Image (cartoon, grey):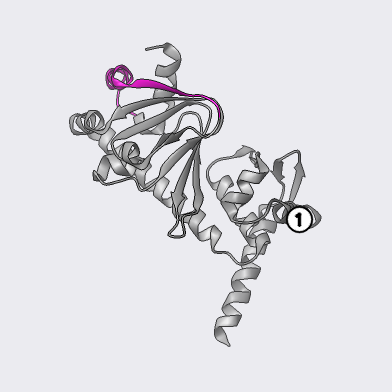
């Protein structure tokens, strides 16, 4: 296995503190898959049997609603594992993945990873932590989709990204929204609606926005948008 792949696995939170020997074992047990072009799919059945790691490109988790429509749940970039819950629980992942352009993946059968979990307590603890983190992220995105006002969705989404660690330096945070159409789909709004909400946040001096990238200059401004909505909903309940 190449030094580059070993370095990527070593940097993954899932393998933090497990030791170089185990990282090398994990790397040696993995297999490589290349997805070319657009919309190469990994179905629910395979997702429920294998764990994947993104070496290059991007993968998008989709879930099919009762009406048959596909909804974007989460995006996974370079250096991320996806569908950890199926490894730990031995249940179906209930999702399918679609690649965004040329994407290279490493994958393992669940039985291989479970053996590593049994042999190393730190590894097992890391998997539980990462699984909890991914579930929390998915829950937050579902909550965002239920917000009524587009401005609230956008402000909450930016705060969510900041929480994930998108800050460039102490008081200025950068969030890349590209492709804009996909971010709008994540939020359940039209692209034009997203653009108008961003422009309002610019007018309120909470952000600057150029070519798909947001610089958050005033986190308090974004929080105020959420607080105003919470207050409005609270007042509505009172009456």
State the image quarter where residue 3 is shown.
top left
Q: Residue furthest front?
A: 68
Q: Position of residue 209 (x, y in %)?
A: 76, 44
Magenta-span inclusion, residue 162: no
Is 165 in front, or is 146? 146
Q: Is residue 173 visible?
A: no
Q: Residue at x 42, y 18 (%)?
A: 5
Q: Is residue 99 visible?
A: yes
Q: Residue furthest top?
A: 2
- Name above or below for residue 150 compared with residue 103: below
- Name above or below for residue 167 compared with residue 105: below
Q: Position of residue 32 (x, y in %)?
A: 39, 20
Is 206 in front, or is 105? 105
Element on which disc 1 rests: helix
- Name above or below for residue 46 compared with residue 154: above
Magenta-span inclusion, residue 27: yes
The residue that mark 1 highlights is 196
**Number of numbered discs on residues:** 1
- Name above or below for residue 30 compared with residue 77: above
Q: Residue at x 67, y 54 (%)?
A: 190
Q: Quadrant of the N terminus?
A: top left
Badge 1: residue crowd in 10 Å (few <14, some 14–19, many ≥20)? few
Q: Residue at x 52, y 32 (%)?
A: 58
Q: Position of residue 104 (x, y in %)?
A: 47, 23
Q: Which residues are magenta?
A: 17-37
Q: Position of residue 127 (x, y in %)?
A: 31, 38
Q: Residue furthest bottom?
A: 239
């Amino acid at each position: 296995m190449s030094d580059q792949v070993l370095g990527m696995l070593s940097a993954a939170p899932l393998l933090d503190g497990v030791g170089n020997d185990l990282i090398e074992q994990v790397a040696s047990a993995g297999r490589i898959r290349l997805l070319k072009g657009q919309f190469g799919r990994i179905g629910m059945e395979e997702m429920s049997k294998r764990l994947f790691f993104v070496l290059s490109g991007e993968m998008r988790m989709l879930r099919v609603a009762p009406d048959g429509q596909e909804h974007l749940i989460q995006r996974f970039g370079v250096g991320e594992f996806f569908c950890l819950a199926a490894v730990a629980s031995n249940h179906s992942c209930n999702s399918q993945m679609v690649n965004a352009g040329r994407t290279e993946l490493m994958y393992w059968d669940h039985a291989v990873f479970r053996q590593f979990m049994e042999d190393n307590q730190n590894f097992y603890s890391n998997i539980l932590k990462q699984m909890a983190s991914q579930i929390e992220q998915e829950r937050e995105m579902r909550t965002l989709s239920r917000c009524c006002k587009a401005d609230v969705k956008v402000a909450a989404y930016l705060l969510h990204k900041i929480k994930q660690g998108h800050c460039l330096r102490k008081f200025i945070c950068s969030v890349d929204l590209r492709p804009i159409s996909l971010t709008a789909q994540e939020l359940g709004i039209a692209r034009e609606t997203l653009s108008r909400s961003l422009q309002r946040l610019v007018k309120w001096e909470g952000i600057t926005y150029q070519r798909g990238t947001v610089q958050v200059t005033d986190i308090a401004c974004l929080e105020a948008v959420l607080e105003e909505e919470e207050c409005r909903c609270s007042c509505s309940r009172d009456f």
